[in-house]
Amino acid sequence: MAPIGERAARADESAVVVLIQDGVELSPDLDAPLYAIESDVRARGVTPPAPITPIDYDQLLELLESHEVRSFV
């Protein structure tokens, strides 16, 4: 996770973090809901640690519709 993204998530009490692509290999230490795209998890053969919940694209769309979106590389 890019340092700027981590700082933004720490500063935002309503932050929700979704890890995608190679980001699913990370385990950020944040006090925010953490999700990972399950197809990216499977493609990389990783198991996300306990606080990270795998979600599918339908669940991602629900999150996108209900939260402000910020993208960090």
Image: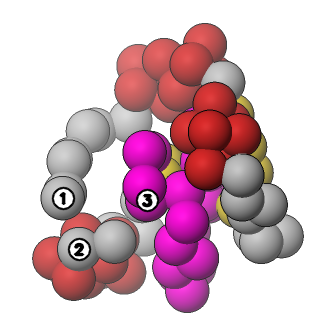
Screen quadrant of the C terminus: bottom left
Quarter of the image where one finds residue 6:
bottom left
| Observer-nearest of 28 and 9 | 28
C-beta proximity under 8 Å, tags 2 and 1: yes
* Label 3 – label 1 distance at C-alpha: 9 Å
Residue at point 41% right, 19% down?
Answer: 65
* Label 2 – label 1 distance at C-alpha: 6 Å
Q: Which mark is residue 73?
A: 1
Residue at point 26% right, 39% down?
Answer: 69
- Packing grade of label 3 (10 A; few <14, some 14-19, many >=20) is some
Q: Position of residue 25 (x, y in %)?
A: 55, 66
Question: Which residue in the structure is indicated by mark 2?
Answer: 2
Amino acid, disc 1? Val
C-beta proximity under 8 Å, tags 3 and 2: no
Disc nearer the start of the sequence (2/1): 2
Left-right relation of 14 to 33: left
Q: Is residue 72 above or below residue 4?
A: above
Disc nearer the start of the sequence (3/2): 2
C-beta proximity under 8 Å, tags 3 and 1: no
Question: Which residue in the structure is indicated by mark 3?
Answer: 23
| Residue 25 on the magenta segment | yes
Query: Bounds of the magenta span?
Result: 20-37
Residue 38 visible: yes
